Image: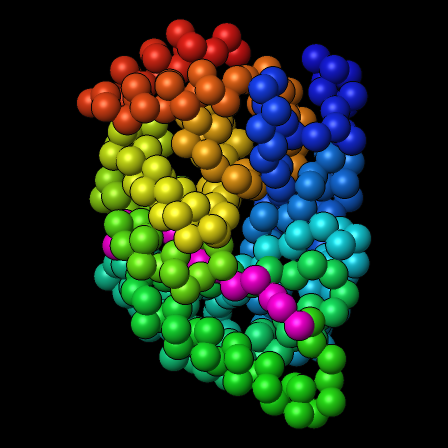
Amino acid sequence: QKAEWAKLVNEKSVTADGHHVELAANIGTPKDLKGVVENGGEGVGLYRTEFLYMDRDQLPTEEEQYTAYKAVLEGMEGKPVVVRTLDIGGDKELPYLDLPKEMNPFLGFRAIRLCLEEVDIFRTQLRALLRASVHGNLKIMFPMIATLNEFREAKAMLEEEKAKLVQEGIKVADHIELGIMVEIPSTAVLADQFAKEVDFFSIGTNDLIQYTMAADRMNQQVSYLYQPYNPSILRLVKMVIEAAHKEGKWAGMCGEMAGDETAIPILIGLGLDEFSMSASSILKARTLIRNLNKDDMEKLASEVLNMSTTEEVVEAVNKAVVL
Ligand code: PEP
Ligand code: MG
């Protein structure tokens, strides 16, 4: 089977009836690029930059960050690279930051919330990204956006840093797509409004499921509630994709669900444009997608959206698609 998959390294990710999607990879460090290339990744859909900040005793400098971002952009040779700005807090701590202990870290001071407060940390990262932007096809996205004002504030800081760099005579790419992760139900529900201002969405289902079902993604005792195929989740995903398309924007997914064989047929039916997953899942996903018909998956998607339980959805997918 692995040998069959390997033949698809340089093939397109296209359904049997000719619908193209992009299969990208999630990475944590420039070292992960080798796996992306070997597995035929068409881009990086999520570069989790927090690993640059972890396992050390001080913040990474602008120069260190620039070096890492440049390495990833050059390594992908012009293919799209979506870099997520710092997503720290929640389950990921930075000992040297001395952040307050919280009752509910997953509902607390994390990701963009922290960056908009600790602006020196955020601006340093934005500068490093902007400087690296000339070395490839950079797209920037902000994590854990809950309101439009958060997005606007973060975007304004990016534009200020860009203007400063230009004034200093430092080259910056002309156009850098700017998107958000959709990980919070408020943002999924309001996706039509966000879509007017962002360039793209990337649905972070790991958190979106946790926040929609109110079930801690790390807590075994409530893991039965962690249901990617629950119609409530599927409806949110549909809202996000439709909102994007209505404004001529693209929608991707970078949570685990994007590489899930039961979810992929539904996501194809819903029109998801980009699937970002661990590199080792790409060839398997490509094999599956090349055997699907978009038309049939659209019918499947509209069926499962009107179901009431996860179990019914799984049964319908298994009937429609022979995995
Ligand atoms: C997500 O929430 O789906 C996601 C991709 O981000 P992380 O897993 O890093 O929280
Ligand atoms: Mg997340």
Q: Position of residue 165 (x, y in %)?
A: 65, 86
Q: Residue at x 58, y 28 (%)?
A: 19
In this rendering, would 214 be left or right of 220?
left
Q: Is residue 255 visible?
A: yes
- 251 versus 234 height, above or below: below
Q: Residue at x 40, y 42 (%)?
A: 241
Rendering quarter of residue 275 = top right
Rendering quarter of residue 162 = bottom right
Give whichever of 302, 142 is nearer the camera.
302
Q: Magenta stretch: residue 184 in it?
A: yes
Q: Position of residue 63 (x, y in %)?
A: 71, 77
Give whichever of 23, 128 is nearer the camera.
23
- 176 versus 189 height, above or below: below
Give whichever of 227, 96 is nearer the camera.
227
Q: Residue at x 70, y 13 (%)?
A: 1
Q: Residue at x 42, y 53 (%)?
A: 247
Q: Position of residue 66 (x, y in %)?
A: 70, 72
Q: Which residues are magenta?
A: 174-186
Q: Position of residue 97 (x, y in %)?
A: 46, 75
- 115 versus 85 height, above or below: below
Q: Magenta stretch: residue 58 in it?
A: no
